[in-house]
Image (cartoon, rainbow, N blue to C red):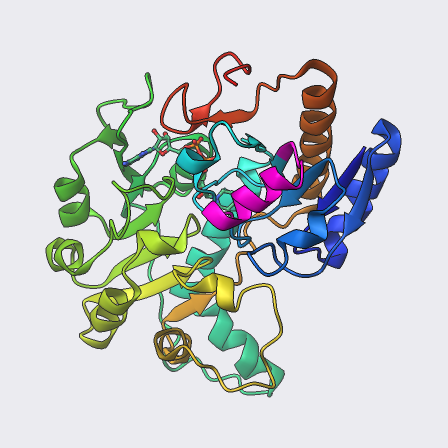
Amino acid sequence: MKIAFFDTKPYDREAFEKYGKEYNIKFKYFETKLNEDTVDLAQGYDGVCAFVNDTVNEAVIDRMAQMGVKVLALRCAGFNNVDMKYAFGKIHVLRVPAYSPYAVAEHTMALLLTSIRRIHKAYIRTKDFNFSLSGLTGFDLYGKTVGVIGTGRIGRVFIDICRGFGMKVLAYDKFPAAGLDNGDTIRYVELNELFEKSDIISLHCPLTEDTHHIINGDALDVCKRGVVILNTSRGALVDAEALLAGIKSRKVGAACLDVYEEESDFFFEDFSGHIMEDDTLARLISMPNVIVTSHQAFLTQEALENIAETTVKNIVGFFETGQCPNELCYRCGTAEDCRDGKCF
Ligand code: NAI
């Protein structure tokens, strides 16, 4: 079996080579992202393996189908970059629903601690033998209220971590998890109450029409002054312009972003020698109370292993049986995991 692998980075290859050999899949690694201009590279391949910033729109889907590509194997959980409605009946879309919720939740806490204890500032100071503490005052997490939007796999691990710090949790989810609300330290509330009462807000829901810009100007107006915004989920959950305005007006105390609305133009690449074209991103990064990482939350050894193993097993299972439990299906639901794996 031959699979065209797009947006390859050196850290992808080791685990994919290992599982590819084990299951007799030959990967051809392309460094370029998948889009209308590059899709023809998949000519002659049985499937395509894509990641979060590859573009799978109507034109790309049509071309893959014309070339006889049977399967699109996403090596990620999110699928907002795939036009699922259009893909239905043309190409089977598989994903890795979970590979390490710990990787993302732990990165979220790492960002939060770095930000509120000013570790990013202290690191640079002591490297320069500047041992002054001025301006490094932080605050305790103990006793603070964290609002968690999305209580799925990652959100729940993040809640556990926050509880370990003695924080109170206000949760919001369109489909609340049974047994999570204990009526005391963890409570499901309406979104407005979460905005009003949280000292810190962390996003762990998928990007959908409902959640697009869930953090916008109106939401920030309701928030406490000094609120800390954490986004390790998807960039477009936050209206970046509104966030920037909130930072400038001092309404937002700090922001930690592992994702950014326009990240596909920049993230994963080295732009250090270039003029940054995105003024909003440049301005956000220039702020002393904003930390940006480059969609890095997933990047642990454990996650890379799990991603490769599940992706390879998805592909093999699909070609052997015509079914895959990790297929995304527009017909079964609104692009939820396919319930019967044989919709078309
Ligand atoms: P999950 O599917 O286990 O949980 C998502 C939760 O969001 C579910 O409980 C769902 O009911 C809830 N939800 C759906 N629609 C909602 C809405 N309109 N409002 C509030 N909640 C809603 O997903 P998981 O594994 O926890 O991942 C969450 C997100 O994290 C993914 O969608 C992805 O965007 C992001 N992610 C980011 C990574 C990174 O490297 N930064 C890596 C992996 C995932």
Residue ID at (72%, 38%): 305
* Along the line of sight, the residue nearer the viewer: 155 or 321: 321
Residue ID at (36%, 27%): 334
Relative to 205, is 31 above or below?
below
The answer to whether residue 251 is magenta is no
Find residue 342 and report its image quarter. top right
Is 255 situated left or right of 13 in this image? left
Q: Farthest residue to the front: give it.
A: 66
Residue ID at (51%, 47%): 56
* Residue 343 horizontal/vertical position (percent): 50, 16
Is 54 situated left or right of 172 in this image? right
* Residue 28 horizontal/vertical position (percent): 79, 48
* Residue 58 horizontal/vertical position (percent): 46, 46
Is 41 situated left or right of 99 in this image? right
Relative to 160, is 281 above or below?
below
Q: Can residue 322 be seen in this view?
A: yes
Relative to 54, is 123 above or below?
below
Q: Quadrant of the N terminus?
A: top right
* Along the line of sight, the residue nearer the viewer: 71 or 295: 71
* Residue 74 horizontal/vertical position (percent): 59, 39
| Rendering quadrant holding ligand 1 | top left
Is 187 situated left or right of 233 in this image? left
Number of on-image labels: 0
Q: Is residue 117 visible?
A: no
Q: Which portion, as a residue range, is magenta?
A: 56-71
